[in-house]
Image: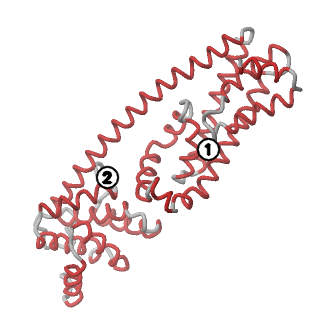
Amino acid sequence: MLIEGLLEWLLALPAPTVYLVIGVLATVENIIPLVPADTAVALGAFLAQRGLTTPLNVFLVTWVANTAGAIAVYVATRTYGRSILSGRLGRRLLSPSAIAAIEREYIRFGVAGIFITRFLPGIRAVVPAFAGLVKLSAPRALIPLAVASGIWYGALTTAAAFLGANWETVTGMVSGVNAVLGVVGLVALALVVWWIVGRIRERRRRVWQRLEQAFQEAGTDPLATADPALRSAAALVLDLASADSTLGEEDRHLVETHLTERWDLTSPGIERATEGELEKSAERIKETYSLNERLGVLERMHRAAIRDTGLSRHETWMISRAAALLGVTEAELGTLTERWRTEAPAE
C-alpha cells in the first residue's frame, strides 16, 4: 500500500522532482541504513515505462548522490570521529586500543574488503563511516566505494527497467536479491569472525612463545641478531609500541624502524600483539616466573631496545611499559634503573 501510494505521488510530480527524491534517498542511505534506497531506484527505473524518467538518468542521479553521501560521511567521521570517541561515552563504546586493533585489521582487508561489503544489505551503509573512523586514505576508501555503488545501482536500474511492465515483479526482484545478499552477508560475517578468532588465538600463542624465548639465558655478544632471547625481547618492545595508543605516530614509526632493522623483525610469521593480549600475558607472566627472572628480561629488553639501537630518548616510555608487562613494581623498577645509571654498559 505504501509503495502504491508513493508510485501515485511520484507520477504526479515533474521529472526533476522525481530525480531529486531518488537522489535524496540514495544519499540518506549512507546515514540511515533503513532508508529504502534500492526500492526508490527500482521505482525510478520503473517509471521510465511511463515516460517520466530514463534509466540512464536514474542511474546517474543515484550513483552520484550515493557516492557524494558516502564521501560526506567518510570525511565527517575521519575529521570528527576520533574526537567524539575520545570523550567519556565514546571511550566506553570503543577504547583507543580497540580502535587501533580495528584499524590494523581493516587495513589488512584493504580495497577488497570495502568493495565486497558495499554490496551487503545492512552493512554497506556503515562502510564509509568505518573507513573514515580508522583514517583509511581517501583513494583506498572512496574508489572502491564509488565503483561498488556504480555496479550495484547500474545492475539494479537495468533490471528494473527491463522488468518495468510489472511493478510486483520489480519489487519481488529487489526483495529477492537483498534477501540472498543478506544471507551471503551473514555467512561472510560468520567466516570473518571465525578467521579473526583463529588469528587471535594464534597471535596469543606467538606472543607467549616470544615471552618464553625472552626468558631464556641471553648470550654476551651485543651484535648477535640471532640471539633468541635478545631478539624476542626486542620483539616484545615492538609489541608494546604497536599496541600503545598514547605513543605518537612519529615516535611509533621511529621505534618500529629501529627495532625491525636492528633485529630483523620483518620476517614472515612475526605479528604484533594487541594491548589486550599483552595484558592477559602479564597476568600469566607473574604466575609463571619469579621476580629475578622478570627483572632479567627487563634488562634484556633495555639492552635490546635501548643500548643497541640508539632509542635512548624513548627509554622512560619503554621501561615503564615493559615493567608493567612483566609485573615489576615502581619501587623495583627504580632500584634497577638506578643501577643502570651507575654501571657502565657492557660493550
User: Which residue extends farthest right?
Assistant: 14
Give the class, few, some or many, for how many residues have Cα within 10 Å of label 1's Cα (few <14, many ≥20). Answer: many
Helix, strand or loop status at disc 1: helix
Q: Quadrant of the C terminus?
A: bottom left
- The mark found on residue 271 in the picture is 2
User: Which residue extends farthest bottom?
Assistant: 342
User: Which residue extends farthest top?
Assistant: 165
Residue 313: x %, y % from top left: 37, 79
**Residue type, label 2:** Glu
Q: Is 273 drawn above or below residue 344 in the view shown?
A: above
Which is nearer the eye, 191 or 145?
191
- The mark found on residue 197 in the picture is none
Q: Quadrant of the N terminus?
A: top right
**Residue type, label 1:** Leu
Helix, strand or loop status at disc 2: loop
- Quadrant of the rendered image containing residue 226: bottom left
Residue 229: x %, y % from top left: 17, 64
Question: Residue at 43% across / 30% down in the picture?
Answer: 188
Horizontally, is 260 left or right of 178 in the view? left
What's the CA distance linking mark 1 and mark 2? Answer: 28 Å
Give the class, few, some or many, for how many residues have Cα within 10 Å of label 2's Cα (few <14, many ≥20). Answer: some
Question: Residue at 65% across / 42% down in the picture?
Answer: 70
Residue 322: x %, y % from top left: 27, 69
Horizontally, is 188 left or right of 123 in the view? left
Q: Is 313 drawn above or below residue 108 in the view shown?
A: below
- The mark found on residue 142 in the picture is 1
Residue 201: x %, y % from top left: 26, 45
Question: Residue at 85% across / 31% down in the picture?
Answer: 17
Which is nearer the eye, 242 or 181?
181
Q: Earlier in the sequence, mark 1 or mark 2?
A: 1
Which color mode does the image show?
secondary structure
